[in-house]
Amino acid sequence: KAGVTQTPRYLIKTRGQQVTLSCSPISGHRSVSWYQQTPGQGLQFLFEYFSETQRNKGNFPGRFSGRQFSNSRSEMNVSTLELGDSALYLCASSVGAGQGGGEQYFGPGTRLTVT
Amino acid sequence: AQSVTQPDIHITVSEGASLELRCNYSYGATPYLFWYVQSPGQGLQLLLKYFSGDTLVQGIKGFEAEFKRSQSSFNLRKPSVHWSDAAEYFCAVGAGVTGGGNKLTFGTGTQLKVEL
């Protein structure tokens, strides 16, 4: 089975712009979670989607949003980019709703640089 | 709120030596615990997990971890380290049987360096 894929792998944007990142989960997986990884804050949970519904949300401003499509693919959007949004954005997929963290498989991430 | 502490930011071991990476968690109920490894420029790879049952769990690449409820710890061990084990290791806690979806809370990571 193919693993979790994320596109693009690298992205450079300017402050004030918006960006959309994409994640394709492992075939058959219905849950997708997003994490932000920075040297200062480490790995932080952004949100989780299951069956096109947001199930859980981390402590991030409303500029960060996401959605999930009927084929389980997910996108996250960051509007009005700030320098501090520069990070590695990781997507993880899991088979189902899980209870407290079913096995999650991570993609390689999208490296976003905001200048 | 759940939290994870990895007290060692950096650890250096010689190839062939044993390894133990520490992890302490804070959670009100029985947690789901994980160890992940991240190589430079890569995503996270799951090494092992603890959900319930036997407190000593085996994972991939020869790693094991022991859940100790009394110490709120979930330390990762390997009897003999290989140079290819050099990477960053993350301990994570899930929401346990109380639900909360698939959200994971991660520790700050331990960077492992292996000396040849």
Image (cartoon, grey):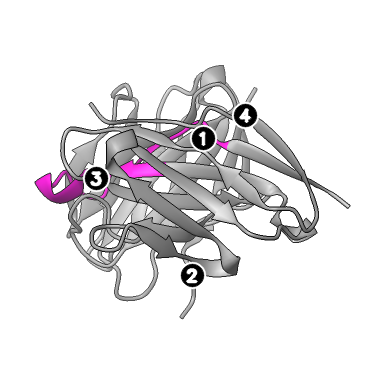
> What residue is shown with label 4?
B9
Q: Secondary structure at mark 4?
A: loop
In front: A33, or A76? A33
Q: Tell me the crowding category of disc 4: few under 14, some 14 to 19, or many 20 or more residues within 10 angstroms, Cα based.
A: few
Query: Residue B52 colored magenta?
Result: no
Which comes sooner in the sequence, label 4 or label 3?
4
> What residue is shown with label 3?
B31
Q: Tell me the crowding category of disc 3: few under 14, some 14 to 19, or many 20 or more residues within 10 angstroms, Cα based.
A: many
- Determine if residue B43 is in view: no
Q: CA distance from mark 4 to mark 1?
A: 16 Å
| Badge 3 and badge 1 both on one subunit | no
Q: Marks 3 and 1: which is nearer the front?
A: 3
Q: Tell me the crowding category of disc 1: few under 14, some 14 to 19, or many 20 or more residues within 10 angstroms, Cα based.
A: some
Q: Secondary structure at mark 1?
A: strand
In front: B34, or A86? B34
Q: Please report the residue visible at 19 percent of the width from the left and 55 percent of the height from the top.
A: A52
Vertical comparison of A29 with B6: above or below: below
Which amino acid type corresponds to the residue marked 1 in the rendered image? Gln
Span highlighted in magenta in the image? B92-109
* Protein chain holding label 4: B
> What residue is shown with label 2?
A3
Query: Residue B107 colored magenta?
Result: yes
Which amino acid type corresponds to the residue marked 2 in the rendered image? Gly
* Protein chain holding label 1: A
* Protein chain holding label 2: A
